[in-house]
Amino acid sequence: MLLPPEVGGVLIIILCHKQHEQAAGTKVFYHEDLETDLEFLRGLSPECCSDLTELSVCLHLHGGYPISAKCIPLSQKQIADWQAAAKHVFSNATLGKLKLDLVCDTGEEDSESTSAILQPLLDFAGVLAECELRLHDKKNSRISKYAEEVALRAKGLDASLRRPFPFMQLPTEIRHEILRYTDLVAPSNQVQWSPSEGFHICRWICCIHDECGFCRNGRCSKCQPLGCLTPEYGWRVARVDFCRLVCSGYSPRCRCWTPPRSLMLVNRTIYQEACDVFYTYNRIIVFPIVLNGNHVTHSSSGNNRRPLRLPISQFILRYRQPSILSRLRCLEIVFPPIDPDAYPEEPHPLYSDWSHAIDLLRIHANVANLKINIHIMFRGSDNWRSQYFVNEMKLANNNTESLFKIHKRLLEPLQALQGMKSFYVHLEWPWHWTLKARQAPGRCLGETRPCGFCKSCLVDKIESWLEQTVMGDEYNSHAIGKSKETPRNWLIKEWKTFVFWDLTRVY
């Protein structure tokens, strides 16, 4: 079969037993079965093969859309047909012109089949201009490494033949600067930690910055490291992804951030230098538990289970080495909604554990250069119309001490760090991070003086009281820059509906 002239040298073929929608502006050829697909490839004339610039082939798919579609195992005949078709295309392709996307989710199940399917890429090493491979729909670092090696060899870049760079012979200062350009420094310098997930970052699929626009050319520079799962025009409407965060594969366009564990395991010297970069240049945000990819920042009503330990205590006691604690520069603590009935009276293991963690910070951390931010969520305050703070203060007869006594008790151990560089408390509610609510400390929505009764004024008053509980009566957080704080990525995701219109000016 000859390549139709209107395609213009770009051919995308979906070799898969699934139905997909055709994206605008892309010529996509579908067939009823795999044998017909492979026969179509073998029938391309040498001239058509030399004109090809892009070829996407899906031989075997586990995940994707629709979920109910059958995944038919590859037979030996189908593998042989693929090898013949690939040999025909690659032998006639123009050197360094063709980009190949190949999906074959047999990496974990059948290594022999996988090797046979990838063999044509190795036989014609250097023919491809670019190569994306996916060998399984589940994440596996070993399979991903194999996919990367094959993809690089298919492009004529054999990693095994490269001479290792004498990194350790460089001066310490040069190594330090190089490490700053690795995954040791997370996107936006924000790394999250939770007892259930360990180190991770806040991710979103739909970009919320104006730079990306709506369904335009991929992601902006702020979103690219957060995930490359945004569908592009073409066959990716089938939801076939090559992202290393969700599958076992390799793609040069995947620049998603992953925890830099490998750099921590090179040797003792690199471990120390990597820790120096990681903890010095990142804001460490400690979260409560993560369930199904979502941080538990809102508890359901009636959930008054007593916590045994605070996540921040777990973090400090787990990474209690002086070499780590001394490098901490910015520590952000996120408390879930605090139910007074859930926190027993002292003495209790929770408080002794928390006090011990703070004592380790006092001894080993560079307190004078340490910034600590506290975020406290509230049940019911996630609704922007909520009058939670106003109503609660009325019920408490404006007695801040009685209403926030549990919060005060939780923060009191931090008095041991009174000399820290800055200490901010944020009582979270959606409009908290809009420009109007932050444009004048203690002033309500642009008025010339505080009204004393609106949510903005009440929240500012309570926050200042809690901050002074730790830092002393003369402490003024706004004077040292609290008003200039911008929402972190997790806050943008949490309050996206409310802060969206301010993002252009905030960033």
Image: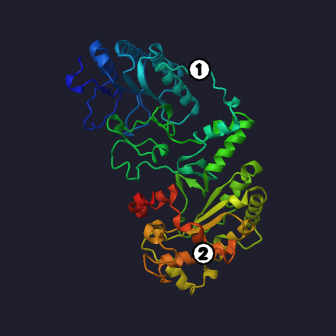
| Element under disc 1 | loop
In the displayed structure, 164 sits above or below 441; it is above
* Residue type indicated by callout 2: Ser
Residue 447: image x %, image y %? 43, 79
Rendering quarter of residue 83: top left
Rendering quarter of residue 371: bottom right
> Residue at image x 39%, y 33%?
70
Please give the label number shown on residue 216: none
Considering depth in this image, is 392 or 66 the residue closer to the camera?
A: 392
In the displayed structure, 439 sits above or below 397; it is above
| Circles 1 and 2 in contact, beta carbons < 8 Å | no
In the displayed structure, 211 sits above or below 121; it is below
Structural distance between the alpha carbons of marks 1 and 2:
58 Å
Residue 39 in sight in this render: no
Rendering quarter of residue 29: top left
| Element under disc 2 | helix
Q: Residues within 10 Å of mark 2 (few under 14, many from 20)?
A: many
- Residue labelled with disc 2: 464
Residue 67 in sight in this render: yes
> Residue at image x 57%, y 85%?
398
Residue 122: image x %, image y %? 48, 16
Query: Tag count in the figure?
Result: 2
Q: How is the image coloured?
A: rainbow
Residue 94: image x %, image y %? 35, 16
Q: Of the residues under marks 1 and 2, which one precedes in the sequence?
A: 1
> Residue at image x 43%, y 42%?
229
In the displayed structure, 504 sits above or below 125; it is below
- Along the horizontal axis of the image, is 416 left or right of 38? right
* Residue type indicated by callout 1: Arg
- Along the horizontal axis of the image, is 116 left or right of 259? left
- Residue labelled with disc 1: 162
> Residue at image x 56%, y 46%?
186
